[in-house]
Amino acid sequence: MSDLYVAAGGGGDPIGTLIAARTVSEAPDPPLIATYAWERPEISDPPGPLGEHHFTRLARGAGGAPAFTPDTRARPPAGSTLPGLAADLPARLLLLLDPSQGLTALAAQISAMARSAGGWIHVVDIGGDILTHGDEPGLCSPFGDALTLAACHLTGIPTTVHVAGPGLDGEIDEPTLLARLPGYHPLTPGTAAASAAARALAWHPSEASALWAAAVHGARGSVRAVNHTAELTAVSPKLFHLPLHEAVGHNPVARVLLDERPETLEDAADLSHRLTGIHGLAPEHARTPRQDPPPGTAAFPDRDVAMKALREAAPGADHVTLRYAARSLGLAWTDIPALRKLLGSATPLLRLT
């Protein structure tokens, strides 16, 4: 038996969720992780939350839930990094959360998974936008997290919410989040917990999870990411926890989802738009103008040329994310492993200084 760990926002959150699970529990068994297949436009067409019908060769896991294996494939033109994560994350199973039938059905999915697993839910958010008040200037993708909070509340199953690396996703700044986490004594992951995600971080374009893993390994200073600049501080490696009801109390979208119980995913996304001005099913908008060459349009430069170009693209930064490095050089995210080899980088971030 095992608790259920829910990656609140999908995308690269299962990577950080693995690190959190290794920190929270001393159980020797690999953790059971559930996640949305909430993909970016550069990975999937359509972007957004993919459902079970978007995949072939899914297995069955806890509570009969669809589960990813290394053999799972997305049906083109959809795309997903989750089969790769199923191969490279040391998790017991990577379960698919499918929100396409709305909030109540999502709650039923999570309930079946959790009751089959062991009856406790851990929701993990990398960066902390799960504690949004809906009006932060950097807010970019509040919907998935709010949907997760509301669905877990509806299950009635004991749930803890974990915030990893406050501010690292660039949506809510670290001081604001710390003011929303008073009196909580955070955990600090060991380097072994972060190293467990190394194979996935070697190729995955996740930035928030990469930033958190790098902070756990001791990286500090400014980091240029695709849509923001993050500062790795002494707080960045921390993993905070709070009760579900307190997280819901911070999140106005989650509260109104619970009040109105929208019947469809589209209605729920419209509600998020009404409260925050951000439509949950629209592609995540960039927060800063992009002037990099379109990804996938350039040939590989040599190492010295690449490093010079990256230092010019991110003046003053101590590090860049590998996703940012690839974009700045006109490469695709799938070129990250080759770029790491070219630059001799074996860590989650590329050091410039």
Image (tube, rainbow, N blue to C red):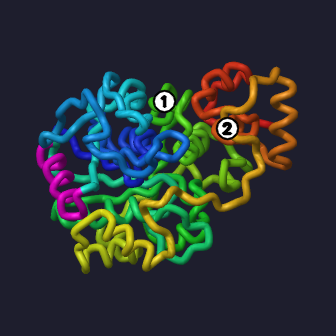
Task: Indicate the amino acid at tag 1.
Answer: Ala
Instruction: Label 2: state its secondary structure.
Output: loop
Kindly tell me whether residue 87 is visible in this rendering.
yes
Measure how far apart labels 2 and 1 are at the Cα level. 21 Å
Image quadrant in which you'd find residue 205: top right
Residue occupying image coordinates x 44% and y 47%: 46
Residue occupying image coordinates x 28% and y 55%: 99
Highlighted magenta segment, given as a residue range: 101-116
Majority SS type along the magenta span? helix
Task: Indicate the amino acid at tag 2.
Answer: Pro
- Mark closer to the observer (2, 1): 2
Drawn side of residue 241 relative to residue 191, left or right: left
Question: Percent x, y for residue 342?
Answer: 72, 20
10 Å crowding of disc 1: few (<14), some (14-19), many (20+): many
Are dots 2 and 1 in contact, CB under 8 Å?
Answer: no
Q: Is residue 112 magenta?
A: yes
Q: Residue 295, which numbered label?
A: 2
Q: Residue 126, which numbered label?
A: none
Residue 130 position (above or below residue 338) = below
Question: Percent x, y for residue 117?
Answer: 16, 42
Residue occupying image coordinates x 51% and y 56%: 283
**Disc 1 marks which residue?**
200
Residue occupying image coordinates x 28% and y 67%: 150
Drawn side of residue 189 relative to residue 104, left or right: right
Q: Quadrant of the C terminus?
A: top right
Instruction: Label 1: state its secondary structure.
Output: helix
Kindly tell me whether residue 29 is visible in this rendering.
no
Q: Is residue 27 magenta?
A: no
Image quadrant in which you'd find residue 17: top left
Q: Residue furthest front?
A: 77
10 Å crowding of disc 2: few (<14), some (14-19), many (20+): some
